[in-house]
Amino acid sequence: MADQQPARAPHDPFAAFPAVRIINLPHRADRRAEVTTELARLGATIDGRHIAFHAATRPADAGGFETIGTHGCFLSHLDTLRQAHRDGVSTLLLLEDDVAFSRSECDAMRATLAALADEDWDIFYGGSPVAATAAPLTLVAPETPVLLAHFVAFSARAIAGLVPYLEAMLTRPIGSAEGGPMHVDGAYGWFRAANPALRTFAATPHIAHQRASRTDIHRLRGLDRFAPLRPLLRAVRAGKNLLRQRH
């Protein structure tokens, strides 16, 4: 199925990506509301077509991964990539629902994505810590690990290779020399190292960050384990996020 790009407002910062998908667990309505507000600040609307939520997976067990959440995150990324491959999109922007944008990141967004459009690229990290060698983009060596996957984009070439690569990881034991169950950002790193012809770029400086929020991936720690305290913690994090947003 060829790219279908519905008419979008000229201020849409993600207009160059035929598909933008936001991974979100159905029960995390708080994160859906927060990320909707974040994208609205950029001028982007979650319309269910160009920009849409992708229902995240919450498996019954860890399945060889570190935690159930780690397993679910891996499966959710894989499901999103499978759908993009079936749809035949030329590029996919994949966001996690804790993605956020500070004032300086918003200011840099358009120039960075315009520069990316001029490159022959396969993987793009918009919110990951990478040692900068240029601005607004740094070409990342295949063997260089890149952390985080809350703002990452893929070309059709990368997607076509990633789907079977990640599926194969699910069949192996943890710690396998060929690559077994692991955090999805680590899996992307293994894939990049195994496919050095693919070109990876990172935004330098980055154009997104992760919003403070109760985790669904790692085991809950400290006060997060006590449900009655969660409204208070949510308010504290909201204040922290507001300060980061103004940077």
Image: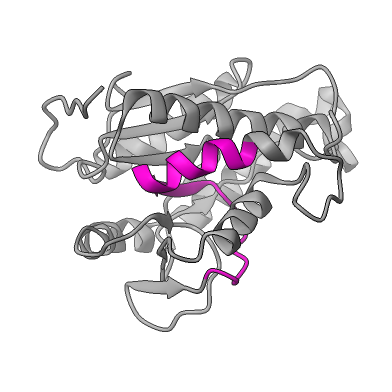
When the figure is inspected, residue 75 is found, relative to residue 95, above or below; the finding is above
Residue 138 visible in the shown view:
yes
Q: How many marks?
A: 0
Q: Residue furthest bottom?
A: 133
Please say whether residue 79 is one of the residues in the magenta stretch: no
Instruction: Give left or right: position of 61 versus 11.
Output: right
Please say whether residue 147 is one of the residues in the magenta stretch: yes
* Image point (80%, 40%), residue name: 218
* Image point (53%, 34%), residue name: 97
Q: Percent x, y for residue 108?
A: 30, 63
Instruction: Give left or right: position of 119 versus 86.
Output: left
The span shown in magenta is 142-166
Q: Percent x, y for residue 124?
A: 41, 57
* Image point (55%, 26%), residue name: 79
Task: Work out which quarter of the rendered image holds the N terminus and state it.
Answer: top left
Residue 109, quarter of the rendered image: bottom left
Q: Which residue occupies the foreground of this view, 32 or 154?
A: 154
Q: Which residue occupies the foreground of this view, 147 or 88?
A: 88
Instruction: Give left or right: position of 20 versus 242.
Output: left
Residue 215 visible in the shown view:
no
Q: Percent x, y for residue 203?
A: 40, 65
Q: Which residue occupies the foreground of this view, 227 or 36?
A: 36
Q: Percent x, y for residue 93?
A: 38, 41
Task: Work out which quarter of the rendered image holds the C terminus and state it.
Answer: bottom left
